[in-house]
Image (cartoon, coloured by chain):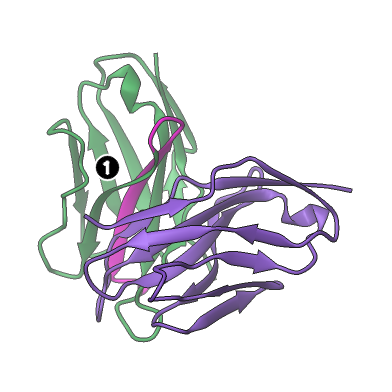
Chain colours: A purple, B green
Amino acid sequence: GDSVTQMEGPVTLSEEAFLTINCTYTATGYPSLFWYVQYPGEGLQLLLKATKADDKGSNKGFEATYRKETTSFHLEKGSVQVSDSAVYFCALSEGYSSASKIIFGSGTRLSIRP
Amino acid sequence: GAGVSQSPSNKVTEKGKDVELRCDPISGHTALYWYRQSLGQGLEFLIYFQGNSAPDKSGLPSDRFSAERTGGSVSTLTIQRTQQEDSAVYLCASSTARQPTYNEQFFGPGTRLTVL
């Protein structure tokens, strides 16, 4: 079945460091790919998405590119802030033209030191 | 506008009791999903409803779990004869069925269930 594998955490970085969180997926078709974020004490929220190969999703300085050839969707940010401390989930959805369940990775906890 | 709401926010129950968890999706969203988040299992899909179609129940872990959606809006997740391994945060999400945002799911704050 479909699955998502992401980098295990926790990841601890200093403020202004470069961030990469690796994510790879297994899917039978052409899924949509997502990064969701869960800030401390808050609910899960969509950070960015990409729906087809070579698409780049971006939001709040974060970026991820849908790489079909390597089945990857790595999350990057050039300069992290303390406020980026959260748990990040890579995810996929197989829905082509209608709603479909999301399959999540195990999550990566990110902590940023001032 | 209002987001997805869930109630109660916290539920403590005794092993063997039944519980009902409620979800109010975003108005106009035709798709509704239930997930649970636990330390050992991460984020797991449970069930989803899309319009008038039969629900996809493929993620329900046992026949003690059931869900219904009345009038295409509010949904109730019922867990019968609760067990300690049911302790988790139960998340509800909703989405539109329209392009291009049909697969963007908006999550509620969750119900934290503790089974003693």
Chain name for mark 1: B
- Residue found 39% across the figure and 85% down from its top: B100
Q: Quadrant of the N terminus of chain A?
A: bottom left
Span of residues in magenta? B27-41
In this view, A48 is above or below B43: below
Place of residue B90 in the rendered image (x, y in percent of width and height, measured from the top left): 39, 41
Q: How many marks?
A: 1
Which residue type does callout 1 highlight? Answer: Leu
Q: Residues within 10 Å of mark 1 (few under 14, many from 20)?
A: many
Is residue B24 visible in the rendered image? The answer is no
Place of residue B108 in the rendered image (x, y in percent of width and height, measured from the top left): 47, 53
**Magenta highlight on residue B102:** no
In this view, B101 is above or below A41: below
Place of residue B21 in the rendered image (x, y in percent of width and height, measured from the top left): 34, 39
Give the residue pinned by disc 1: B77
The quadrant in which residue B102 appears is bottom left
In this view, A73 is above or below B99: above
- Residue found 16% across the figure and 33% down from its top: B62
